[in-house]
């Protein structure tokens, strides 16, 4: 069977679904049905492709329009691309169900359904395009599709805070896009191609200094999108203002598209141009600064936004180790973080509806009032904190083990920093758990005094309207919690796939192999 025919559907189906949803703008149920059907079909296709490429030990390449490689657009599905499309589809589906419940309960005041569904499917198309792009320009197109859709989604509702955050977000994203486009132009001028496989073959022809400039330029562009310190300043102020479903999908997926681009850059384009020491230093700063920012916050969305930044540092750390074991551990941790971070933001969305606030200074007594929400927050929180036997612990242990095998002094410093970051993450999340769930309404003034230092933190006093929580929102969050547990239960098979990804990424693919795959 020719499975290559399925590859373009990963992009065309969401775009077609977005068009249908836009046409059916006044028919809410039609839009919902189209969105769910589209993402479900994409999930099924991606799962089939993952099984095929993993079993066949060869990627699937498709030359769009029949143009010969490298002149046309090449869609490229290897184990990494297929795995990330599967995980992204699961997350997008769960968040979609959450948003459907929220929209029905709120009469679509917060996420207007006529706008939300087309934009959401276009966002999905951009994510999938980025993951399966075989050339840098198509990767750029994926990023731009993301940018357009995400700007619409982040400003839904039209409040002052969302518009302001949206402006910051789009300005920063445009700067990243300009850097990326400039790098593409210079690479094409120097090498005569934007195909990633051909770039990797021709890069050795350039002087070392030129390679380094191109390398750093691409890393700068992707580091902004991945929220790597010090280019992460925009994220904590942008994500928390968006509606809960939008924040969840942004936190889970958008930064990971930047990390994915960094992985492709380091393992394919610049194998012989070593900036690993720089990446280690950046990873160290990202982990420490991110988690210290989380400790200073009193608002749950901002706490999670800063932990998101700090845990991107783990992925950069694994990428900088640059061994097959480290790359495999990075992929596993990336999958873990996509799922767990999304789940935590969904759980915080439930807390906001139940308590009318996400400030840990205001929310009290939820253990008695909402024990189900307590469980839905607690499980992913301890997972993100790295407690055994959860997937967070497995991923971090694998990263530390890979670093210990290299054994340089800087690696040892990063291992210690990673352990400290994990403990501080656990402290920040469990402090929030203790105050929001265990603290009773009549707690003593002593407790209030101990946390008074958080009173000046941003959004510490923000209150919203308490709202009913539809069952579908709770069910969607519970489903994601189940997926986080599944990452632990099935850690062995999943980690084996990630290990094969790590080994394959460091094995160069030739342009002739790519042409053979596209010709099948």
Image: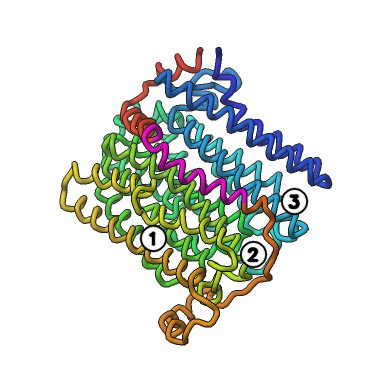
Which residue is at the far bottom?
445
Q: Secondary structure at mark 2?
A: helix
Label 1 sits on residue: 230
Q: Residue at x 48, y 44 (%)?
A: 257
Q: Which residues are magenta?
A: 475-494
Say if 442 sits above or below 44 in the image.
below
Q: Are marks 3 and 1 in contact (CB under 8 Å)?
A: no
| Residue 145 seen in this snapshot | no
Quarter holding residue 470: bottom right
Residue 74 in the image, given as x and y percentages of width and height:
52, 26
**Which residue is situated farthest in the right direction here?**
26
For marks 1 and 2, give the CA distance: 33 Å
Tags 1 and 2 in contact by the CB under 8 Å rule?
no
SS assignment at label 1 = loop
Q: Nearer the viewer, mark 2 or mark 3?
A: 2
Q: How is the image coloured?
A: rainbow
At 46% from the left edge and 39% from the top edge, which residue is drawn? 184
Please tell me whether the stretch drawn in magenta is mainly helix, strand or loop.
helix
Q: Earlier in the sequence, mark 1 or mark 2?
A: 1
Residue 262 in percent (x, y) is at: 40, 43
Residue 287: where, in percent of width, then height? 34, 58
In the rendered image, which residue does mark 3 sit on? 113
Q: Nearer the viewer, residue 248 or 513?
A: 248
Which of disc 3 and disc 2 is earlier in sequence? 3
In the image, is 332 to the left or to the right of 363?
left
Q: Nearer the viewer, mark 1 or mark 2?
A: 2
Q: CA distance from mark 3 to mark 1?
A: 36 Å
Nearest the viewer among 76 and 481 is 481
Q: Nearer the viewer, residue 138 or 51?
A: 51
Relative vertical location of residue 344 with respect to residue 366 in this rendering, above or below:
above
Kindly identify the residue that appears in the image at 73 percent across and 50 percent down. 115
Q: For numbered disc 3, what is the local secondary structure?
A: helix
């Amino acid at each position: 069977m020719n499975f290559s025919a399925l590859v373009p559907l990963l992009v065309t189906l969401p775009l077609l679904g977005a068009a249908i949803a836009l046409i059916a703008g006044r028919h809410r149920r039609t839009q919902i049905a189209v969105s769910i059907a589209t993402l479900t079909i994409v999930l099924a296709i991606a799962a089939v492709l993952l099984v095929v490429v993993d079993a066949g030990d060869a990627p699937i390449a498709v030359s769009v329009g029949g143009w010969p490689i490298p002149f046309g657009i090449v869609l490229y599905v290897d184990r990494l691309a297929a795995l990330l499309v599967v995980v992204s589809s699961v997350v997008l589906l769960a968040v979609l169900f959450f948003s459907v419940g929220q929209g029905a309960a709120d009469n679509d005041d917060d996420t207007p359904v006529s706008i939300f569904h087309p934009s959401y499917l276009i966002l999905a198309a951009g994510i999938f395009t980025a993951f399966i792009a075989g050339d840098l320009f198509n990767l750029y197109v994926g990023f731009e599709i993301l940018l357009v859709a995400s700007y619409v989604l982040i400003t839904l509702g039209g409040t002052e805070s969302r518009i302001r955050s949206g402006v910051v977000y789009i300005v920063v994203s445009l700067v990243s896009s300009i850097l990326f486009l400039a790098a593409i132009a210079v690479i094409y001028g120097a090498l005569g191609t934007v195909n990633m496989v051909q770039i990797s073959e021709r890069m050795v022809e350039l002087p070392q200094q030129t390679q380094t400039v191109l390398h750093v330029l691409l890393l700068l562009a992707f580091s902004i999108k991945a929220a790597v310190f010090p280019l992460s300043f925009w994220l904590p102020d942008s994500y928390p203002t968006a509606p809960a479903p939008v924040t969840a999908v942004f936190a889970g997926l958008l930064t990971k598209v930047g990390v994915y681009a960094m992985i492709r850059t380091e393992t394919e384009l610049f194998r012989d141009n070593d900036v690993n020491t720089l990446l280690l230093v950046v990873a160290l700063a990202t982990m420490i600064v991110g988690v210290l920012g989380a400790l200073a916050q009193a608002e749950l969305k901002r706490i999670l936004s800063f932990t998101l930044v700090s845990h991107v540092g783990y992925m950069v750390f694994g990428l900088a180790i640059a061994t097959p074991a480290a790359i495999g551990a990075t992929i596993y941790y990336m999958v873990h973080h996509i799922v767990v971070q999304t789940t935590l933001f969904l759980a915080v969305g439930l807390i906001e509806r139940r308590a009318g606030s996400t400030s840990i200074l205001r929310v009290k007594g939820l253990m008695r009032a909402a024990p189900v929400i307590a469980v839905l927050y607690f499980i992913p929180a301890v997972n993100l904190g790295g407690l055994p036997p959860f997937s967070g612990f497995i991923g971090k242990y694998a990263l530390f083990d890979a670093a210990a095998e290299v054994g340089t002094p800087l690696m040892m410093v990063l291992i210690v920093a990673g352990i400290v970051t994990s403990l501080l993450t656990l402290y920040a999340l469990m402090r929030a758990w203790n105050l929001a769930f265990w603290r009773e309404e009549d707690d003593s003034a002593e407790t209030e005094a101990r946390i008074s230092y958080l009173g000046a933190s941003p959004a510490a006093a923000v209150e919203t309207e308490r709202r009913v929580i539809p069952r579908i929102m709770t069910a969607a969050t519970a489903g994601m919690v189940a997926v986080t547990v599944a990452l632990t239960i099935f850690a062995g098979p999943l980690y084996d796939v990630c290990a094969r990804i790590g080994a394959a990424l460091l094995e160069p693919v030739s342009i002739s192999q790519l042409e053979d795959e596209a010709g099948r």
